[in-house]
Structures are given as C-alpha cells and as structure tokens.
Image (tube, rainbow, N blue to C red):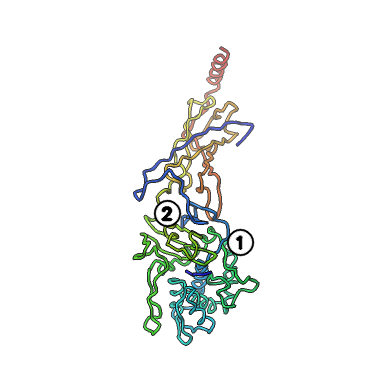
Amino acid sequence: MMYKKMRKPLTIFFSVILLLLSPLSSLAATSDIPFDSLAQAAIAIDADSGQIFYEKNSQEPLPIASMTKLISFYLILEAIHNGELSWDETMTINEHLYELSHNTELSNVFLAQNHHYTIEDLFDAAEKVSANAAIIALSERVAGSEVAFVDKMREKVEEWGIHDAYLISTSGINNEDARGQIYPGSGPNEENLMSARDMALVIYHLIHDFPEILDDTSQPTALFAEGTPEEVVLESTNAMLPGMAFETLGVQGLKTGTTELAGTNFAGLISRDQRRVITVVMHVEEYDEDTGKRFEETQNLMNYALDDWEQRPIVEPDAIYQEATTDYGTKPKVTLHYQKGPVYWLPKNQSVQTEFVPDEHKWTKNNTLKMPIQQSEVVGHAVIKLPGTAKETLFDQNESVSIPIYAGETIDSLPFLQKIVKKTQVFFQRLF
C-alpha cells in the first residue's frame, strides 16, 4: 500500500420459461435487492472459468497503485521458473533505492546499502508490506533496469489481451515520488492505469501460472532478513487475512493499493466450499480517509458471488422440452428432449427464457413433425438467453446458448392407405 499526494418462412416458435430452482446456500439467504458496490469500479469473477458475477465500471482504466506489483510478481516468478533467478541469491541496494526505501511517505522496508538481501527477502517485503524500493530492486535484477522491466510488463499484458493499460513503473508509485527515475515520455504526476476487469485478468494468470504465489499471499506475516541485524516481522497490508481486523474465512490474498490518485483499492481472492472467486475494488475511499471500507466492500462482493450464484446445467440433460404433433405418424405425439447443455454459474432462483428454433427440413408448414422420425434425431435447437452477467466471461461473451432438441423415440409414417383415410377424416373435420 502506498500513501500519497429466428426464421420467417416457418414461424414455429415455442416459448417456455424454465424455473431452475435450487435450495438456498447455507452461507446466507439470497436478497431481492440488486447488489451494488460502493467502489468507483469493481468486478467479481469465477477464478477458474473467468465467468463474471458482478461488474461496475469495470472497463475504465483507473490508477491501480500497488496492485501493479501483481504484474511484477508474475514476471519475477517467471524469471525464477526459467532459471534466470533463484530465491536464495543475494543482491545489494544502490543509493537511489536506499534513499527511496527511507521515504516514510511511501510503503517500504528500510534497506541498507551494504547489506546482502536475498531475492526471497525482497519479494516478501514487496508482497507483505508493498515495499516499493524492494520491488524496484527486483525489477532491476531481472531486466537490468526498471524501464526495461516496465517494457516486459507492457509486453506481458499485451500478450494477455490487455491493450488499454498505461504502465510506467514496477511499483505503482506516482512519478512525483520516483525521485527523478521515471519512464521515458511519462508525465511528472502520472502513475499506472488499468481497468478492474484487466486487473482481474492479471490475477487469473498469476494464480493459474504460478499457484505457489498463494503460499505467500495467504500468510499474514513473514520474517524479513532472518538471522541478520535487519531482521523484522512483516505484517501484511491485507487486513482480511487470519488475525487481522477484517479477517474473512478463505481469503488467500492478494494485494492492496493506495495513492492520492487511486484512493484505496484491493485485489482479492477467496476459496470456500470448493469455489474460488477473484474480486477487485477500486477507489473505495480517498487515500487519506482509509477506514478499511475497501475490505468491507470486498467482503460484500465475495459474499454476493458466493451466496447468490450457483453452478448448474443450463438445462438438465435429457430433460423433456415438450410434446410435438406428428404429421401422420403411427403415434399422434412425440416427446422432445434437450441434449446435454453446458454448465454455467447462474443467479439462484433465476428463470431463463427459452425459444425453439426448428430445423425447417423436419417440420411441416402446419407445425407438425415430418415422419418418419428416429429416436435421438435432432429436430431443432433451444436458444436459451443468459441472464445478466452470466452471459460473459473475461475471455468471451455469449448472449445465448443453443442446445439441440431431439425426438425421444422412433415413430414411423402411417401406411399409405391409413394415411389417405386419416387425411380424409381431417378434411371433413375442417369442412364441418
């Protein structure tokens, strides 16, 4: 944390409302009041599928402050996995970072110029207390300079499909606090910008590519420079961890962020009942009015995603859709069924609207099913409109889902003479 200043020739539509009900979660009852976050921007997603549960102003790039470090963590872990860096190797601090580390208006661990710090120590300092000089030191070790590391950050987020982020530092501090060491072409009072949605995508990649990060971010403390005169216990800025003021069962991280421009921010992850949810809240309070509301808003967002949504098939496999009239079949009706549909996270007690789109080659102009028909033969599709944010993930958007509808049994056409008799009967019925 940093403190600073369907078809027209054949109109054969069937509509049905499927009430997909399920018991309420034991965690909390669902509410009839729509959820809304107090944050300027917010998002909650399923950490595995990327499906969006909630979003507010989630695509506007805003200052991200120290949440920036999640991108830096990714690149440092990548360097370690690639053999370019090891946890136990040591490094010293240059004069610029020594002075930066002693700026008490920024989040830091005081660093000494002649001390040999392990990569793990500096990583812990950046992860636990958002130490800015420590993350810059690591970035210089990996890329040769902070500017070169920022270039790697820009390349990485572009690789992930993030195109409107503005990255100019590895730490997230404002340029006015960088002691003259700023990214070429950036302004004197600028800082990193990214949308809540894109920050959620950063977290998605971080926890999937390097799940070991959670071994660190889930712990409330770490011992810095153990066994040396610089030894100190680092207490996480994440107040939702065990023993902290906003302790929340299942929270595994990840990162606070605070600057004058960014206000108070938090990128969170919760694992509960075999579910994982990523949340991001941005600019919840002003930086100098921090009462912990970012953590309260994160709790509310996590509870909404966990309590008001459930994972279930969009329709039950082989469920009956409805009956259809046969066109001179040996049976007058045939039952139509859904094929297996996809599984989605859906709001609890949410009804979904289904519209039938027939295969025009299988139906008559009188809306009867042509004979013969074979069991399991597909006769059309049910187009199911997805409600709310259930239609969207971080990676794609689907306004609806199409599920094949098939015949439940084989039915033959009436023999020729019987068909003539039947047609004659129908003719006179219509005549009189």
- For the residues carrying marks 2 and 1, which lies nearer the camera in this image? 2
Residue 104, disc: none
- Which residue is more in the foreground, 247 or 140? 247
Could you classify mark 2 by the number of other residues whose Cα lies within 10 Å: few (under 14), some (14-19), or many (20 or more)? some
Q: Tell me where residue 86 appears, x and y as whole percent.
A: 47, 78
Label 2 sits on a secondary structure element that is helix
Q: Pointer 2: what residue? A: 300
What residue occupies the far right of the structure in this picture?
185
Could you classify mark 1 by the number of other residues whose Cα lies within 10 Å: few (under 14), some (14-19), or many (20 or more)? some
Figure label count: 2
What residue occupies the far bottom of the structure in this picture?
114
Task: Write the residue at 47% across / 73% down.
Answer: 107
Label 1 sits on a secondary structure element that is loop
Q: In the rendered view, would you say 132 is above or below 14? A: below
Q: Pointer 1: what residue? A: 164
Which numbered disc flags the more N-terminal residue, 2 or 1? 1
- Which residue is more in the foreground, 21 or 39? 39
Q: Tell me where residue 129 appears, x and y as whole percent.
A: 44, 72
Whole-Å distance between the Cαs marked 2 and 1?
Answer: 28 Å
- Which residue is more in the foreground, 242 or 272? 242
What is the three-letter code of the residue carrying label 2? Asn
Task: Write the residue at 40% across / 68% down.
Answer: 215
Q: Tell me where residue 169 appears, x and y as whole percent.
A: 56, 71
**Can you say which quadrant of the picture contains the C terminus?**
top right
Q: In the rendered view, would you say 403 is above or below 258? A: above
What residue occupies the far top of the structure in this picture?
432
Q: Is residue 424 left or right of residue 340?
A: right
Q: Tell me where residue 346 appears, x and y as whole percent.
A: 46, 46
Q: In the rendered view, would you say 301 is above or below 115? A: above
What is the three-letter code of the residue carrying label 1? Asp
